[in-house]
Structure formats: C-alpha cells, structure tokens
Image (tube, grey):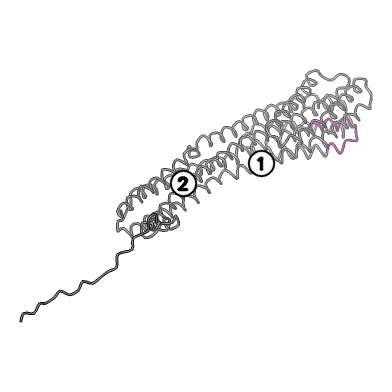
Amino acid sequence: MTQTTSAPPATWSPPAAQPAAGTPAVAPRRTTPRGAVQSWFAGTPGRMRTILIVSAAIAVVFGLAAAQGFRESDGALKRAEANTAQLVRIQAIHTSLVSANADATNAFLVGGLEPPAQRQHFVDSMAQAAKLIAEAATAQPADQAVLGQLNTTLLTYQGLIEQARANNRQGLPIGSQYLKDASATLQDDSLPLLDQLVKSNEARVDTEFDGISYGNYWLIIAGLITLVVLIYSLYWLAKRTHRYLNVPIAAAAVLVLLTMLVGGASLASAGSHAKDTRSHAYADTLALSRARIAAYDAKSNESLTLIARGSGDAFQTAWQQSAAEVDKQLAIVAGTTPQLQAPWGQYKTIHGTIRDLDSKQGNWQSAVNMSIGNASTTFGAFDKGSADSIGETSKKVGSELSDARNGLPPIGWLGLPIGIVAALLVAWGMSQRLGEYR
C-alpha cells in the first residue's frame, strides 16, 4: 500500500495594515539649530573652528588697538603743539600788558606830553594784547570765560591810564594816583587771570606730553595677547595634526610681530623726541617768557619808585623780586641764549645808579633822566634780544613736535587692514587642516 506524504499546511499571516487614505507619512527626524551648532563645534574639527574664530577675532582687535594707539599718540602730539602755541600766546598777552604798563609809568616821569614813540609803543602793545586775546579765545574755547573777564579788567585799566595822562599833562598831582590805581588794577585784577590761564595751559601741555607714550601701551599689550593666541594655535595644531608648522598662521604671527616692532620703535622715537622738546625748546620758551614778564614788571616798578618820590620802598622791593625772577629764568637759558646776560646785567647796574642818585644823593631829576634815558635804552636791547630768542624757541617747539608727528608710520590708517590680513591668514591656515577631515 502506497503512502502519500502531504505538504504541511501553509502558515497564514494577516495582511499588512495599509495607511488609511489621506494619512500623511511619518517625516524623518530634523536637526534643531542648537544641535547643528553643537555638531559644528564637536570633535577635533569643531575645536579647530573655535580656535579659528577666536584667533581671527583677536587679530582684528589687535589691528584696531594698533590704530587706536597711533591715533592717540598722534593726537597727543598735535594737541601738545596746539596747547604750546596757546601757552606762548597767553604769555605774549602778559608780556604786552606789562610792557604797556612800563611805557605808561616811564612816560609819566617826563611830565606833560609823553614822548610820541613811547606813547605809540603803549598803544601798539595794548592793540597786540587785544588781538592775541581774540586769537586765544578762538584757539582754546576752555579759556574763553577767563579771557572775557580779562577784557573787562583791561577796559578799567585803560580808563585809569587815560585819566592819569590827562592830569599829568596839566601838571596835576592826582595824575600819579590814577597811575598807581591803574597799575594796581593790572597787578591785582588782570595779571592773576593771566596767571590762571598760564597754569591751565601748562597743565594741558604737560598732560599731552605725558600722553604721547600711551599709544605704545595699546600696541604692545594687544600685540602680546595676539601673539600668545597665535602661538597657542600653532602649538595645538602641531600636537593634533603632527605637522610642525602652519605657514599661514605663522605668517600672521610674523605680521603682528613686525607691526609691534616697527610701530613700537616709531612710537618710542616720537616719545623720545617729544621728551627732548619738552626738556629743551619748550623749557627755554617758558623761561624766556617768564624772564620777559618779570623784566617788564621790574621796569614798571622802577618808574613807580621814582614817581612815589621818597615813599616808594614797596615798589623797590617789588623791583628786587622781579629782578631775582629774571636772573633765575635767564640761568635756565644761559646755555642757549647767553647773549641776554649782558644787557640785563647792564640794566641792573644802571638801576643801582638810579637808586643811588634818588635815595642817597637826593638827585631825583638826574635819577629820572637816567631812567628814561640810559636805563630805557639798555632795557630796550634786552627786550629785543629776548623777543627774538622766544620767537626762535617757540617756532622750534612747533617744528620739532610736527616732525615727530610726521615721523609716525601710517598705522593709524593701516592698523585695521593689518588685523584683517592677519585674520585671513589664520582662516587660510586653519581651513587647510579642516579640509583633511572632509
């Protein structure tokens, strides 16, 4: 009997469920922006990108800091030049006023109508003072308020001088009192304002001279930070990629280093030149200005001593103080302007003779004649010599500061481009390594 082997029954599986009509398919999972950023900075490539961004940003900041440093030093040199010119201008106002007062007091000794040349010198000195006050107010707005007060006091001074002249021409003794009041107004009201302006401008000049070296701080500090970051980048890449030198990043470091060396040397040179100017030409200008002011003050007091006729001890004491100031200031410039010593020494000798004639011999008229004669002539030689010298020294100050500015390389303009070039070199060098991971 033949047995038939039957095939095993097929296993039944239910039909796969089909999505209902109109039901959307499940979308693939999307990456969030935060996840994309984390992925971009993940792993060694991510660290490379981080170093690239930091290094490039630091390079650009270095360029900005270098530009700022050069602009700061250049601006300090420019402001020092302008403030020095303003200081000389203020001291010229002071000199013009004490010169005019010396003319007025010395001419008063003549009696009646004063010498035309001396009168004209008084008028010219007052006109020069008025012109310089207007220029000073325009050049330095911070001085305008004090200069306005100065103008007011000068109106009072000129009014008293005119009253003194009118009474003197008539031979009235009250004229001498008006003259003393005018001198007191100048000494007590006008000159203190000028002293205030001189101190303010000297402080500004000193601040700018000190600020010339500050530009180097910007350059050096920013440069050192940038070099540290770039050297670290080179070290990190060498350690991770086993390549000892990344040429573009090394070139960026060399560019930063060269900018520091060239820029630092030029800023140091400008600071050194400014320091020399401050110690020599500027110091000489100040000393000559102070000497001229004190000398004119002494000449005024000489005349006032004679006008007082026996009661001028206070004016003689003031003369001695002014003369001592002239001696002190001329000692400062003895090495550069020795030609001023002789006329000033001659004038002091003549003044001693004047005082001997007046106080010891009782020969007042001879003392007056010598004061308006030999003393004025000798003093005029000192006046001309000191005026020429101060003109030369003040021009030298401006010239030397201008040369220091012109000697600065144009890093104030090129700083940012230098920083951008360094940043591009960093990006180039880092992109070479990043390409190896793609």
Question: Where's residue 100, x and y in %?
Answer: 78, 27
Q: Of discs 1 and 2, which sits in the foreground?
A: 2
Where residue 14 appears, as percent x and y from the top left, is 29, 68
Answer with mark 1 or mark 2, whichever residue precedes in sequence: 2
Query: Could you say whether the residue bearing mark 2 is in a helix, strand or loop?
Result: helix
Q: Is residue 344 above or below residue 248?
A: above
Task: Name the residue: 20% across, 74% down.
Answer: 9
Q: Residue at x 90, y 29 (%)?
A: 178
Residue 232 in sight = no
- Badge 1 element: helix
Q: Nearer the viewer, residue 226 or 149?
A: 226
User: Which of the pair 90/413 is nearer the observer?
Assistant: 413
- 313 left or right of 235 in image: right
Quarter of the figure with residue 49 = bottom left
Which residues make up the magenta segment?
298-316
277 lies left or right of 312: left
Q: Residues within 10 Å of mark 1 (few under 14, many from 20)?
A: some
Q: Which mark is residue 204?
A: 1
Seen in the image, is 228 located left or right of residue 86? left
Numbered marks: total: 2
Residue 144 in the image: state x and y as whole percent: 74, 34
Query: Residue 131, located in which quarter of the rendered image?
Result: top right
Q: Which residue is identified by label 2?
A: 60
